[in-house]
Image (cartoon, rainbow, N blue to C red):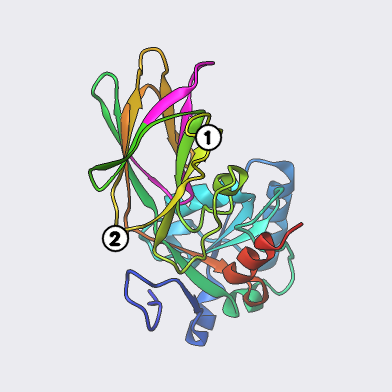
Amino acid sequence: MFRLAGRSARHDATEPMPQTRRASFEHLAFVASDTTEARDAQARLIAEYGNVAPEDADTIVALGGDGLMLQTLHRFINTDKPIYGLNCGSVGFLMNEFRVEGLRERLADSVVTALHPLAMEATTVTGDIHLAHAFNEVSMMRQTYQAAKLRISIDDTVRLEEMICDGVLVSTPAGSTAYNLSAHGPILPIHVPLLAVTPISAFRPRGWRGAVIPDRCAIAIDVLENEKRPVSVAADHQEVRDVLRVAVKADVRQRSLILFDRNHGWEERVLTEQFRT
């Protein structure tokens, strides 16, 4: 498999696909979400370019929206198979513009970004421990009409003794333009070793807008008054209910590779989003 040139495993953010790999795009695997638009697109692309099993592919082409891309990133984590998304959904921030023609040329000229997920450890009221990874965010939410009460610690030091809120999320740079942005959290450039901790509809302290912390830090969020105010947590699409404590940290040992068209790469998408009116 190719290596991302010129960067350590910790900072291998964005690099052009080496031109010597142009021939590797001969073996493509097309995966699609379960929508009519995505399935029709898959049929057209397979007719044009053929199709191999994902395990035999050099590149995975994902057809759908951002939800499918997240699932595909999880599915092929640590395989170093680059994933190229074509938008057949709605927002499609993680996807490229759908076109049938010129696919292999676009792939050969694309730019690869390595995404490192968050590692989550959630402890439930019954003492069960659930482990999961999240490329976008780990989000905690109240389960009932009662607001949640949460305590936030960074590296074993309590930083926020009590927050009354709908919830809180921890976002990667990749996820900072998703739920984090909707909750008025900061947009993080993909290269920076930072995480966003963002409150969701905080009632007290009302003036706290969140924090940006180094991704080497360990974050722990404890649920207060859990019997009266139950809380669930979701790591991307994996949900755990009735949690007592959630620990989150960046896992730089894990990665998935995502491809973007050169003229509309990650940095351009982030800049466009920040100046959107």
Which residue is at a point 32% across and 55% down the rendered structure image? Answer: 251
Residue under label 1, please give it: 206
Q: Total marks drawn?
A: 2
Label located before the other in sequence (1 or 2)? 1
The magenta-colored residue range is 131-150
Lateral position of residue 175 relative to residue 262, left or right: left
Lateral position of residue 192 relative to residue 87, left or right: left
Q: Which image quadrant: the N terminus?
A: bottom left
Whether the magenta-drawn stretch holds residue 175 is answered as no
Name the residue nearer the viewer: 16 or 80.
Answer: 16
Name the residue nearer the viewer: 96 or 200.
Answer: 200
Main SS, magenta region, reads strand
Residue under label 2, please give it: 253
For badge 1, the amino acid type reads: Arg
- Answer above or below: position of 222 versus 64: above
Whether the magenta-drawn stretch holds residue 144 is answered as yes
